[in-house]
Amino acid sequence: MTDFSTLNLSEPLLKAITSLGYKKASPVQAKAIPMVLTGRDVMVSAQTGTGKTAGYALPILQRLSEMKVLKNHPVRALILVPTRELAAQVGENISLYGQHLALKTAVAYGGVDMDPQIKALKNGVDILVATPGRLIDLLEKEHLSLSHLKILVLDEADRMLDLGFKRELDKILSDIPDKRQNLLFSATFTKDIKQLAHEYQRHPVKIEIESPNSAANTVKQSVYPVDQQSKPEILSYIIKGEKWEQVLVFVRTKKAADKVADLLSDEGICATSIHSDKSQYLRSKTLIEFQARAWDVLVATDVAARGLDINQLPLVVNYDLPKMPEDYVHRIGRTGRAGSPGRAISLMNPEEKPLLEKIRKLINKSLDVEPVPYFDNVSGHKEEAEPVKKEKPRRSATPDARSKKPGSDRRRTSSNGQKPAFGRKPGQQRKPAGASGPRQRRK
């Protein structure tokens, strides 16, 4: 790997990188940084978790620090991202990289009070990280001018198009100076991305790291065949059998996220959910708690698939296979980051087989359907056993005791003190109805 000291970065940047524990640049950083430093337009395709943010943030910081300092610090670099979570993360990273430079960074996204963002802009901002919707709000209300813009970055550009931001992007691009450096970073190079690059970039340098649309080699991928009604039980069984303590579970809908988190909580697993119906404050708080391991399981919609950077996240589970195969790559990219080993498990019902075929075709890799692992008394000893069709699990009785982790109100124990039903092995029969008292649906 390439040493950062060979990439012509300034001493303040190298000092910051060293203090953060980085010495070697990833392949995308080694290729992108020198090109961005030249001032040319660049489009980069690299699998998620490879360090794309530093690939553009470091050279942008250096280029701006070498330019003439302007009065009131007008925005000279704009970084557009698709989600609030990614905006917050990118803003934090840039602040860390530029901690020894006299440059100001701000973040603007929707779902929160605009006043603090307006105040930051009035005080002067060199680098602005923003989501398209909030940026347009600021522009239309004349709280922001982009007349001095020198560098534009579209990060996770494919996701912005997936989320329907093309109209917003066109409006923003029409309101900024023509003479600027344009950087496009994406996990995939679809036809729409290539068209977008054609519309706003000038003879860009193309950088592709490994094969596009592929997952990191460090991620072990498995597909387990299950009936839809058995998914909650199998999910809990796998988590308990392997003793996973930090699991990111992806579902398709907001309703499913809350339901699955509740079912896992009822079975003694500390779980919570995150999706777009929750306030930005609560989403941010939940992510911080999950990274601090206050929750064992985070059940999320694809709002959380992009931009999350959780150190050493061991397991990602596709509770539902995504309808868009590209989302599979982004989901499992939350694990196996920066060379760390990772695990990705997909629970597939018979109706989802066509979705699996699309994923196989996209990543150009055979994903074999495997039997659900067998755990002896859920102790971690594995054998192989074909799953059997199960009746839909009933909800646990209303608990009379709760064991809480920080910020938790969901971790529960059964009122009769017995092990939750989800903890038994696939195929193991339930006790006869009434053997341990009736189960009541939690209200």
Image (tube, rainbow, N blue to C red):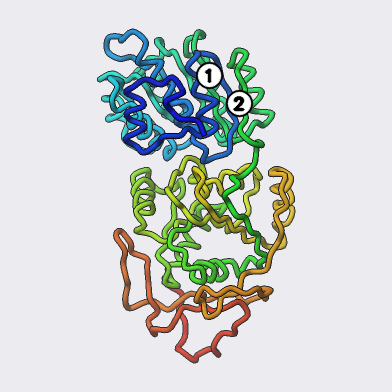
Give x and y (percent) for residue 34.
50, 20
The residue located at (54%, 52%) in the rendering is 253
Residue type at mark 2: give it. Ile
**Corner quadrant of residue 374:** bottom right
Residue type at mark 1: give it. Met
Mark 2, Cα crowd under 10 Å, few <14 / some 14-19 / many 20+, is: some
Vertical placement of residue 358 versus 232, above or below:
above
From mark 2 to mark 1, how far is it between C-alphas?
A: 10 Å
Residue 35 bears which disc, if any? 1
Give x and y (percent) for residue 101.
29, 22
Residue 207 bears which disc, if any? 2
Numbered disc 1: secondary structure: helix
The residue located at (62%, 22%) in the rendering is 206
Please give left or right for residue 367 compared with residue 47 in the image.
right
Give x and y (percent) for residue 353.
73, 57
Q: Is residue 136 visible?
A: no
The residue located at (28%, 18%) in the rendering is 124
The residue located at (33%, 30%) in the rendering is 16
Numbered disc 2: secondary structure: strand
Q: Is tag 2's residue or tag 1's residue first in the polypeptide sequence? A: 1
Give x and y (percent) for residue 191.
69, 29
Q: Is residue 3 visible?
A: yes
The C terminus, quarter of image: bottom left
Closest to the observer, 376 or 135: 376
Mark 1, Cα crowd under 10 Å, few <14 / some 14-19 / many 20+, is: many
